[in-house]
Image (spheres, helix red, strand yellow):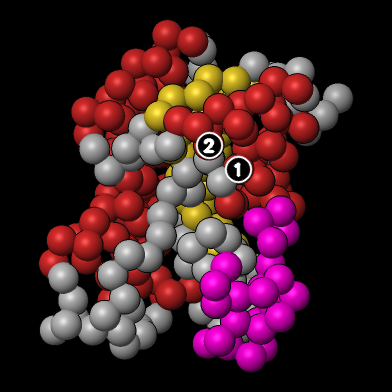
Amino acid sequence: MSKLTGKIALVTGSGRGIGRAIAIAFAKEGADLILAARTAEQLDAVAEEIRALGRNVLSVPTDVTNRQSVDALSEKVRGEFDRLDILVNNAGGGIERNSILDSNPDPWIETIAVNCISAYLVSHALLPLMIDSGGGRVINVGSGMGHRPRAGNSAYNVGKAGMWMFTRCLAEEVWENNITVNELIPGPVATHLTGDRMRVGGPPPFAPSEVVKAPEDVVPLALFLATQPDGGPTAQTFSLTRRPI
């Protein structure tokens, strides 16, 4: 039996990058998947890969920063499945990379929304289904930048800091429902957002001790967190970085 046989998992930001890698890996381990991201074409491509593995998949184009869009996602999930076992809040990214005084308020606020508020909206909408399922695992994809200040990148750092604190607060509220909530920090990963600055196997420009990973390199830690037994760790940060966070 595969590690996730009989489980239902929802992965946000699953059209590409880390979210895609986690979704496909979960399917290979026997889970049925719910895919949520903005771009329908990307979701459809990932859904086809998962169907080819013999798993059921629901693909829902969703803006996870928009409450109405997330509510629509929740309704479609409940219409297709009667349970939810794993939630991976993976959607994120850095849009505004200027100093605070030189920043544009609109993309600054958008960056906060996609890196933190999205996790709140999705969790708020779907945790009741997980509770009704008897419990589950929430994995919030964070960043070491959410644990330390950095000039010129405040929007991303603040957004991920919010994700870190959201993880800890939520864990305190749902442990009695047999739900664990943990933060996964991938460290530097070459994706569509970072590919112009990072090369897999090399160091990133900001930390010579680090080794840039491919999205698939994040999968083992995600599987570890998804398969922890009842009573396993919660409110914790698990990191693949090669420097203090």
Q: For the residue marked with disc 2, what is the amino acid?
A: Gln
Residues marked 1 and 2 touching at CB (< 8 Å): yes
Residue 175: x, y in percent? 45, 40
Q: Is residue 98 left or right of residue 12?
A: left
Main secondary structure along the magenta-highlighted residues: loop
Return the residue at label 2: 42
Residue 179: x, y in percent? 50, 37
Residues at marks 1 and 2, CA–CA distance in whole angstroms? 9 Å
Q: Quadrant of residue 118?
A: top left
Query: Residue, x 51% and y 12% (percent of image)?
Result: 81
Q: Is 121 situated above or below 34?
A: below
Q: Is 18 situated above or below 13?
A: below
Return the residue at label 1: 20
Q: For the residue marked with disc 1, what is the amino acid?
A: Arg
Q: Disc 2 on helix, strand or loop?
A: helix
Magenta span of residues:
195-218
